[in-house]
Image (spheres, rainbow, N blue to C red):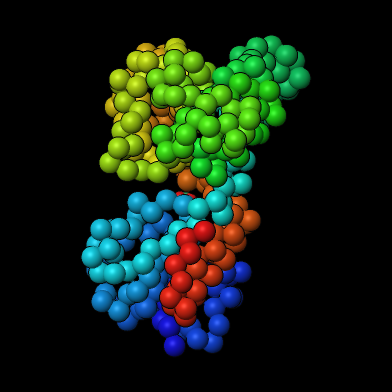
Amino acid sequence: MFKINRLNNIAHVGLDLLTDNYEMVEGLNTADAALVRSANLHEIELPNSLKAIARAGAGVNNIPLDKCAEKGIVVFNTPGANANGVKEIVIASLILASRDLLGGINWVTSVKEEPEVAKLVEKNKAKFVGTEIKGKKLGVIGLGAIGVMVANVAIKLEMEVYGYDPFISVGSAWKLSKYIKPSKSLEEIYRECDFITVHVPLTDTTKGMFNQDAFALMKDGVKLLNFSRDTLVNDDDIIAALDSGKVGKYVTDFPNPKVVGHQGVIAIPHLGASTNESEDNCAVMAVVQLMDYLENGNIKNS
Ligand code: MLT
């Protein structure tokens, strides 16, 4: 019998796959394996009984990979399983960053009791005029499952899409989507693009990559979307770039108090992968991988 500890809510469709060989236990102390979403395992003692950790999500920065390697704990994640959910919120955010939907919605709610609302609307709607994304240049940094999906939809929306990924060749980027313009450098994306969306993992190299030096290379008024990890973006530098108008809008999927409330920031409470479909896909992939490892010793991080 394998003991599994669940540190976060994991969709039932995944948990239901666990056969009679498995027992859910409270706490990690005696567990053979852990199922986790966003819990920070850096702060938790990992017991010697632990053989595997499966994260229902793509990023693994909440898991102490070095410590796991030392202890022989195998770590799984679920790359691609929530990519469609993230793709859809990124596309919505391109439009949110271009059309003042939030301003308009808040304003109309505030005047709904006023007599002759229709006349007020006519007088005020000029305040909410936006721009279209068609014909604008979008830089996609990171051409994994999410980046490629975002690029493909943006192309259908008639954006001009530049892609950059240091880990794939220009030729492979072309094969991924023949309409993505493969960029040889980040600088080219920074120089050319009206919108930049980032889809890279948090590593020592990517942490703080959006800093004052990067912003200095970007177009004035560029709109930056971050649905990857909060600390890819330097807090002080993004605020300075927003204040100076260098960055026109920052859409972030992280409730970082240092940026939330700034008028140029649209902050979302980490909802990128929060759809029923994505949560189900991640739970199934995490549980299937875990069972295959515990029962058969297979390591397939699909
Ligand atoms: C991910 O890394 O895929 C996301 O952080 C998933 C989540 O929202 O838990």
Q: Identify the residue shown where x is 64% and y is 16%.
A: 135
Res 280 seen here: yes
Q: Position of residue 128 (x, y in %)?
A: 62, 17
Res 247 seen here: no
Looking at the image, is 92 positioned above or below residue 239? below
Q: Identify the residue shown where x is 42% and y is 14%.
A: 245
Q: Residue furthest front?
A: 171
Quadrant assignment, res 117: top right
Q: Identify the residue shown where x is 27% and y is 63%.
A: 69
Looking at the image, is 164 positioned above or below residue 20? above
The N terminus: image quadrant: bottom left
Looking at the image, residue 272 sits to the left or right of residue 74; the answer is right
Quadrant assignment, res 18: bottom right
Looking at the image, residue 272 sits to the left or right of residue 38; the answer is right
Q: Identify the residue shown where x is 50% and y is 18%.
A: 193
Q: Position of residue 46 (x, y in %)?
A: 27, 70
Looking at the image, is 83 positioned above or below residue 125? below
Looking at the image, residue 176 sits to the left or right of residue 9; the answer is right
Q: Position of residue 144 (x, y in %)?
A: 51, 42
Q: How many tags in the picture?
A: 0
- Please state which of residues 231 and 145 is positioned toward the viewer in this rendering: 145
Q: Position of residue 247 (x, y in %)?
A: 43, 19
- Please state which of residues 27 and 59 is positioned toward the viewer in this rendering: 59
Looking at the image, is 201 positioned above or below residue 106? below
